[in-house]
C-alpha cells in the first residue's frame, strides 16, 4: 500500500470522515484530501500524531514492517565458564535426570574441557570433570567422574563416583560404586556395593561382595 492508501484505510477503520480526521489533527479538509490523493504529504511534525491516532508505528504508517527486537540473552543460573552442559526440559519445565531421561543419550565427538549432563554421556576424551545423570561411556577423563548410572572409561585421573558399576583401566583417585568395580589399577580407596576385581590396588577396599586383587598395597 502507498502512503496515501494507508492514510485513507486507517481513517476509514476509525470510522472518520476526511473532515473528522482533519479536525483531530488540526488541519483543513483539503489537506487530508490531498494526502489521500497523493498530491501532498503531511508536515513531518504531524507524522507521530497521525501514527498515534491510528495506533500504529511510524514504520507501519509508511508501509514498512516494524523491525523485530533482538531477543534478550537468556538468564542462566550458572556462570559463562565454558562447561558443556546438557539440560532436559519439557516446555519450560525442567525435567532433570528423572525417569524420562533414562533412555536419552548425549554423544559428543572431540575433547571437552568439562561436561555436565543430566542424561547419559558417550564421548571421547574429557579434559576436565564429567558429571552425568545417567551412564558414562568415555575415553580418558582428566578430572573426576560422577554418574547417576554406571561408568565405563579408559583412564580417569581423578576420582569416580557412580550409583551403578564402574569399569575402567586406571583410576588415580577413589572409587565409589553402588555396584561392581572392575579396574586394572586403582590408586585410591574403593567402596563398592558389589564385587571388586582389580589387578593393582593401593588403598583400602570395602566391598558388599567378593574382592579379587592380584597386587594389593595396603
Image: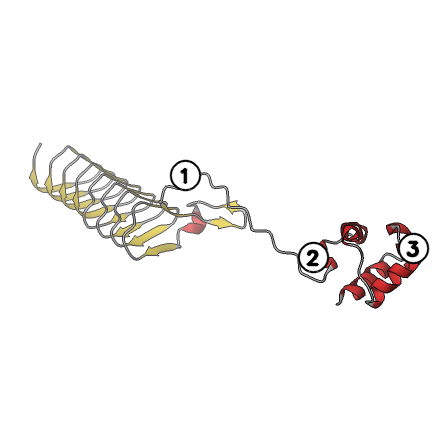
Q: Do the numbered discs 3 and 1 sit on residues whose CB atoms are within 8 Å?
A: no
Image coordinates for residue 78, horizontal then vertical, percent: 42, 39
Which residue is painted at 18% across and 34% down in the image? Answer: 189
- Find numbered disc 3 in the image and state the secondary structure of the residue it sits on: helix
**Labels 3, 1: front one:** 3
The residue carrying mark 3 is 20
**What's the CA distance linking mark 2 and mark 1?**
39 Å
Which residue is painted at 91% across and 61% down in the image? Answer: 30
The answer to whether residue 17 shows anywhere in this view is no
Q: Nearer the viewer, residue 183 or 91?
A: 91
Mark 2 / mark 1, whichever is N-terminal? 2
Rendered image quadrant of residue 63? bottom right
Image coordinates for residue 212, horizontal then vertical, percent: 12, 42
Image coordinates for residue 217, horizontal then vertical, percent: 7, 35
Above or below, comparing residue 54 to residue 217 in the picture: below
Mark 2 / mark 3, whichever is N-terminal? 3
Rendered image quadrant of residue 196? top left
Say the numbered circle drawn on residue 146: none
The residue carrying mark 1 is 79
Q: Name the quadrant of the C terminus.
A: top left
- Find numbered disc 1 in the image and state the secondary structure of the residue it sits on: loop
Mark 3 / mark 1, whichever is N-terminal? 3
The residue carrying mark 2 is 59
Image coordinates for residue 25, horizontal then vertical, percent: 86, 51
Q: Nearer the viewer, residue 79 or 140?
A: 79
The answer to whether residue 195 shows anywhere in this view is yes
Amino acid at each position: 500500500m502507498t502512503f496515501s492508501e494507508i492514510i485513507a484505510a486507517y481513517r476509514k477503520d476509525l470510522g472518520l470522515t476526511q473532515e473528522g480526521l482533519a479536525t483531530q489533527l488540526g488541519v483543513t479538509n483539503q489537506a487530508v484530501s490531498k494526502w489521500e490523493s497523493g498530491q501532498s504529504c503531511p508536515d513531518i511534525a504531524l507524522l507521530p500524531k497521525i501514527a498515534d491516532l491510528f495506533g500504529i508505528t511510524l514504520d507501519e504508517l509508511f508501509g514498512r514492517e516494524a523491525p523485530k527486537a533482538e531477543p534478550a540473552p537468556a538468564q542462566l543460573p550458572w556462570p559463562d565458564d565454558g562447561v558443556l552442559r546438557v539440560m532436559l526440559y519439557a516446555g519450560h519445565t525442567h525435567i532433570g535426570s528423572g525417569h524420562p531421561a533414562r533412555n536419552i543419550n548425549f554423544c559428543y565427538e572431540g575433547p571437552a574441557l568439562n561436561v555436565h549432563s543430566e542424561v547419559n554421556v558417550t564421548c571421547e576424551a574429557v579434559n576436565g570433570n564429567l558429571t552425568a545423570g545417567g551412564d558414562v561411556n568415555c575415553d580418558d577423563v582428566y578430572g573426576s567422574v560422577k554418574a547417576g548410572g554406571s561408568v565405563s572409561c579408559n583412564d580417569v585421573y581423578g576420582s569416580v563416583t557412580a550409583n551403578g558399576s564402574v569399569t575402567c583401566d586406571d583410576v588415580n583417585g577413589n572409587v565409589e560404586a553402588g555396584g561392581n568395580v572392575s579396574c586394572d589399577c586403582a590408586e585410591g580407596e574403593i567402596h563398592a556395593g558389589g564385587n571388586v576385581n582389580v589387578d593393582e590396588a593401593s588403598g583400602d577396599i570395602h566391598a558388599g561382595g567378593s574382592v579379587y586383587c592380584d597386587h594389593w598395597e595396603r
